[in-house]
Amino acid sequence: MRTMRTMTTFKSFLNLFRWPNLIIIALSMSMILFFVVSPLLGISALSDGLNTIQFILLVISTILISIGGYIVNDIFDVNADSINKPGKNLITSTISEKTAYTLYWITTVSGVLLGTLLSYLINQINFGLIFLFSAGLLWYYSQKYQCQPLLGNIVISALSAISFGIVWLFEFYALSGNAEVFTNVQSSFPFVTRIITIYMGFAFMVSLLREIIKDMEDYKGDNRFGCTTMPVKFGISTSKVVALVFTFISLAAAIIVQYFFYNIGFLILFGYFFIIDILIVIIIVNIFRAATKTDYTKLSTFIKLLMLAGILSMVLIKFDL
């Protein structure tokens, strides 16, 4: 009986932490380092720049701050989620609010401290402010921005993009401590920055689209408890138009990036991006058709697939070199 209760509690904490999202964060950061930065620079991962301990610190600090963001978001969303996601918000039903707050402070403070330690180890102590700023923004998002039309969506999408770019930022400054390697590879920095910017832009646009769709999915609960998201303030129809605009922009950007890959001879990536194009077209069609909460939930699934497809495309860079 005790074992079953322990397993149930453990599962509840995993769900509270959004473990699938954490896996995606760790996967995307690892793939940025191993399949984008290192191959493009022609260096050894976890050797010439960030070492193993430093990279683990970077991933863990990012994950801990993300967990804190998920927890505080659930705390402030208890009322709305009672309608939007009945039984899925674990705060008060399975985990007490006091325990949730304790977990929030433990994970957030630990994440900021580990990020600051990493910053010190690469002689950039001021980079600790990145982790502090991110944690503060997640708190403020949950308390203030989440219920502001579009602004909250942009904030959370920007943070998603930062998790892609932060690997390159820390790798760059870790490399600067190795004068010989830094000198040998510095001519490749602009190209690496361009590729990283493409993936950051992709993460931003896909996250923004997902946030807008999620707001339409959660319209009923947000409306009842006075959370003035874009669908609540301007209506579902207007929100669908905005979602479509961003989706068409994403499709245009994907085609431009695909053309860029073709021009630089990355033909495998060029071909792979037809999958990205098709997924975006499927999302556009489903936005036009969406009318019920189930439709928007289905749309969220397609957007997650799009994000996963984008992350997996990094593997192909190594084969295009």
Image: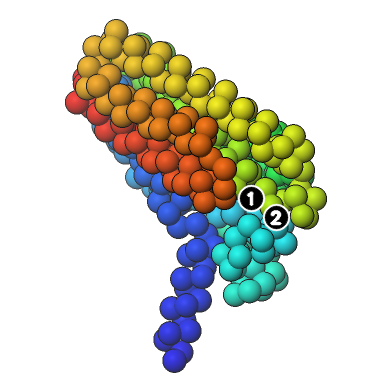
| Marks 2/1: CA–CA distance | 6 Å
Amino acid type of the residue tagged 2 in the rendering = Gly
Element at label 1: loop
Say whether residue 58 is left or right of residue 32.
right
The answer to whether 89 is drawn above or below residue 187 in the figure is below
Say whether residue 315 is left or right of residue 249.
left
**For residue 218, which numbered disc appears in the image?**
1
**Figure quadrant of the C terminus:** top left
Element at label 2: helix
The answer to whether 93 is drawn above or below residue 64 in the figure is below
Q: Residue at x 41, y 28 (%)?
A: 281
Callout 2–callout 1 Cβ contact below 8 Å? yes
Amino acid type of the residue tagged 1 in the rendering = Asp
Say whether residue 233 is left or right of residue 73.
right
Q: How is the image coloured?
A: rainbow
Front residue of this view, candidates 274 and 238: 238
